[in-house]
Image (cartoon, grey):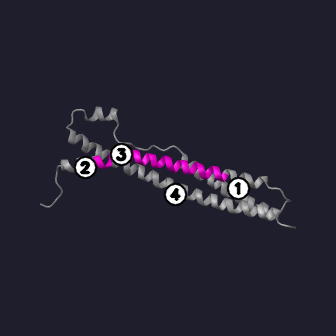
Amino acid sequence: MGGLPSEPNPEAVDFIFDYVKDAPERQLAGAEALDAKMVQIFSAGSVIIGLGGLTSGGQKPLSAVLMAFAIAAYVGLAALAFAHLWARDYRRSLQADELWLRLWASSVPDIKHSLVHDISAAYAHNKALLLRKRWTLRGALTAAAIEVALVGGAIVARLAGP
C-alpha cells in the first residue's frame, strides 16, 4: 500500500547502472588531479622558502623573525602535503575476479543490481576521501600564501636601509 516495491524496476536498474558505472573511475581521476595540484603547491612552497635564504643583506632581527614564521608555514605546508599524498585505499566497483566468483550464476538484471549497489558504496567511501583531500589542499594553499607573504616581508626587511 504505497510502500516501496520489493523488487527493483529493471528499467531503473539499467538506467542507474549506465549512469553510475564510471563514477568510481571519475573519482580516481579527480583524486589524481588533486594530488597533482598538491605537488605543484608544495614545489612552489619549496622554491619560495629557498628564495628567502638566497637574498643578501645584513642580519636584521625583523627579517629573522619573519623567516622563522615562514619556515613554520612551510613545515605546515609539508605536513599537509604529506597527509594529502599519503596512500589511501580507494574503492572501485566489483572487478572481474570478484564479479565472476560471486555472480557467475546470476541473471543479468541481478548482476547489474549488485554492481549498482557496490558502485554506490564505493562512491560514498571515495567521496569522504576526496573531501579530506580538498580540505588539505585548501590548507596547503593557505600555508603557501602565508609563507610567500612572510618570505617577501623578510626579504624587504633585509634589504631595507639601516
Circle 4 residue: 135
Circle 1 residue: 71
Q: CA distance from mark 2 to mark 3?
A: 13 Å
Q: Amino acid at mark 2?
A: Phe
Of callouts 4 and 1, the N-terminal one:
1
Q: CA distance from mark 4 to mark 1?
A: 21 Å
Q: Residue at x 67, y 50 (%)?
A: 46
- SS label for mark 2: helix
As drawn, the label of residue 22 is 3
Q: Are marks 4 and 1 in contact (CB under 8 Å)?
A: no
Q: Are marks 2 and 4 in contact (CB under 8 Å)?
A: no
Q: Amino acid at mark 4?
A: Trp
Q: Amino acid at mark 3?
A: Asp
**Does residue 11 lie above or below 150 as drawn?**
above
As drawn, the label of residue 15 is 2
Which corner quadrant of the image does residue 74 belong to? bottom right
Q: CA distance from mark 2 to mark 4?
A: 33 Å
Of callouts 4 and 3, the N-terminal one:
3
Q: CA distance from mark 1 to mark 2?
A: 53 Å
Measuring from the top left, give residue 71's x and y in whole percent. Answer: 70, 56
134 left or right of 16 in image: right
59 left or right of 38 in image: right
